[in-house]
Amino acid sequence: MRLNDPQVWTLIGVFAAVMLGGMTLMTTQLSRVIRAEVDRVEGTLSAKIDRVEGTLSAKIDRVEGTLSARIDGLHARLDRIEIKVDDLDRELTNLATRFWRSQ
């Protein structure tokens, strides 16, 4: 069979068209599969990140509450110390006034 027969060129053209069509179909299917897998991985990662974020938020809120309570306790203690220092200052002022007036 010679390559200048029209039937041969028709068969070559049909074969080339079928091959290109098959490659296009496979590429499209592969693209869809990859997109689906990437979306699945994205969903999984988003769920895990949201769970970690929720856990961290809860822990941070708990630590913040604990620190707030401790700071309030320190504030109360400092207020009591300030009252005692003011009382001592008043008493010392009274003693100094008595001492200096007596001389």
Image (tube, rainbow, N blue to C red):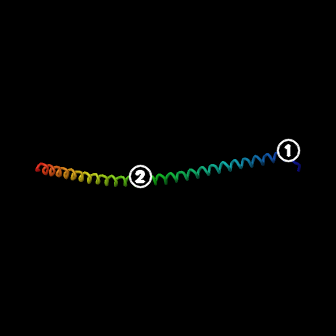
- Tag 2–tag 1 contact (CB < 8 Å): no
48 sits left or right of 68 in the view? right
Helix, strand or loop status at disc 2? helix
Tell me, for residue 94, which label it has, or none.
Answer: none
**Frontmost residue, 61 versus 90:** 90
Front tag of 2 and 1: 2
**Frontmost residue, 75 versus 39:** 75
Q: Earlier in the sequence, mark 2 or mark 1?
A: 1
C-alpha distance separating marks 2 and 1: 75 Å
| Residue 89, x across and y down, in percent | 20, 50
Identify the residue shown where x is 66% and y is 48%: 28
Indicate the amino acid at tag 2: Ser
| Residue 47, x across and y down, in percent | 49, 52
Tell me, for residue 57, which label it has, or none.
Answer: 2
Give the residue at the far top of this rendering. Answer: 6
Indicate the amino acid at tag 1: Pro
Give the residue at the far left of this rendering. Answer: 102
| Residue 6, x across and y down, in percent | 85, 44
Q: Residues within 10 Å of mark 1 (few under 14, many from 20)?
A: few
99 sits left or right of 11 in the view? left
13 sits left or right of 54 in the view? right
Identify the residue shown where x is 89% and y is 49%: 2
Q: Which residue is mark 1?
A: 6
Identify the residue shown where x is 21% and y is 53%: 84
| Residue 80, x across and y down, in percent | 23, 53
90 sits left or right of 47 in the view? left
